[in-house]
Amino acid sequence: MQVEFKSIPEYFIKEKSGRKSNTIRDYNSLDKRHKLLIEGRAETIMIKNTETKETFVRKITDVCFFKGMLVISWKHNSQNHREKSTAQNNINKTKTEINTGN
């Protein structure tokens, strides 16, 4: 099963890039998502940018409590990160070639 949470743009960028591979939520025993997480029935998490509505999905690696909060950690999709890095490198190379005439 998958759970979905919203994230403000500042955090979303860090979470999507892998610099921040977790989210912390105030625990609510009535929240069905929290129940799924605690019972170990949630396998993936979808994070949605509150402004752009962009989303990403990651595999959950750990769920724990800390001072009344639920900490949800996930595995960063490094393949996706490598693809983006390669694409950015190609863009930079092309810009250099244009600027130097090569």
Image: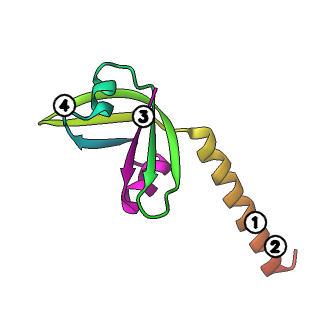
Q: Amino acid at mark 4?
A: Ser
Q: Nearer the viewer, mark 2 or mark 3?
A: 3
Whole-number angstrom distance, CA of label 2 to CA of label 3: 39 Å
Whole-number angstrom distance, CA of label 2 to CA of label 4: 57 Å
Q: Amino acid at mark 2?
A: Glu
Colour setting? rainbow
Between discs 3 and 1, the one toward the N terminus: 3
CB within 8 Å, label 1 to label 2? yes
SS at circle 2: helix
100 vs 30, nearest the viewer: 30
- Residue 74 image label: 3
Between discs 4 and 1, the one toward the N terminus: 4
Residue extent of the magenta highlight:
1-21
CB within 8 Å, label 3 to label 1? no
Q: Residues within 10 Å of mark 3 (few under 14, many from 20)?
A: many
Residue 88 among magenta residues: no
Q: Nearer the viewer, mark 3 or mark 1?
A: 3
Q: Residue at x 30, y 28 (%)?
A: 63
Q: Position of residue 67 (x, y in %)?
A: 11, 36
